[in-house]
Amino acid sequence: MLSSRRFFFAVMILLAFSLAGCGAGGTGGGGTGLTSVSGRVAMEDLWGQPTVPQGVVLGVAGTDRWDTMLTDADGIYKIDNIPGGDYRVVVKKVLDLPADTVFMVNPSAGWSIHLMGRIPMVAVDFTVIIMPAPPKL
C-alpha cells in the first residue's frame, strides 16, 4: 500500500513539472510571444477570371520588416515571427505587371488585426483585381 502511494505521488509530481514547462516559451511560434499571420490571396482580371497570384508582396503597414512575397501558386501566404500587438496587414505591391496596368485590392485598406503571443491569426484573405490602364485620349 505504501509503495503504490509513493508511486502515485511521484507520478503527480512529474506531471506537475511537465505541465509547468509547457507554457515556458519553447520554440513553437519562433520564440516567446511571437506569432504568425496567414491567409490566401486570390487574383483575378477585370472580367473576374482567376489568374495565378505571383509577385504579390504582403506585409505590415509602416514597416518592411515582415514583407513576404507570395510564391505559392494557390495564393497561400504566411508571415512569421511577429510580436503580439495591433497591426494592419496590407498588399503592398504586385511585381512584374505591365507598365500600364493598375491593381485594386479588397479590402482596400488591408486588415486591422490584434495579435496575441503564440496565437496565430488565420484567414486574413485578400482579392487582387488587375486591370489595364484606361486608354490615353
Image (cartoon, rainbow, N blue to C red):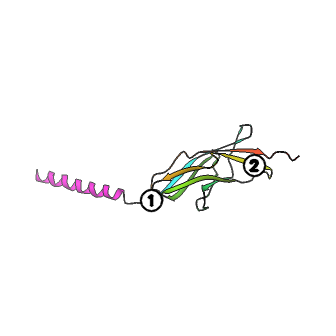
Q: CA distance from mark 2 to mark 1?
A: 38 Å
Seen at 61% across and 49% down, the residue is 110
Q: Label 1: few (<14), some or many (≥20) within 10 Å?
A: some
The answer to whether the residue labelled 2 contacts the one labelled 1, judged by CB atoms less than 8 Å apart, is no
Residue type at the position of mark 1: Gly
Q: Position of residue 54 (x, y in %)?
A: 68, 49
Residue 72 is left or right of residue 20, and the answer is right
Which residues make up the magenta segment? 1-25
Asked whether residue 47 is drawn in magenta, I would say no
What residue sits right under mark 2 in the picture?
Answer: 102
**Label whose residue precedes the other's in the sequence (2 or 1):** 1
Nearest to the eye among marks 2 and 1: give it: 2
Seen at 52% across and 47% down, the residue is 122
Seen at 45% across and 52% down, the residue is 119
Foreground of the two, 1 or 120: 120
Q: Position of residue 58 (x, y in %)?
A: 62, 53
What residue sits right under mark 1 in the picture?
Answer: 33
Residue 49 is left or right of residue 7, and the answer is right
Q: Which mark is residue 57?
A: none
Residue type at the position of mark 2: Val
Q: Position of residue 87 (x, y in %)?
A: 54, 55
Residue 43 is left or right of residue 10, and the answer is right
Seen at 62% across and 49% down, the residue is 109
Magenta: main secondary structure? helix
Q: Position of residue 125 (x, y in %)?
A: 59, 45
Judged from the image, the secondary structure of the residue bearing numbered disc 2 is strand
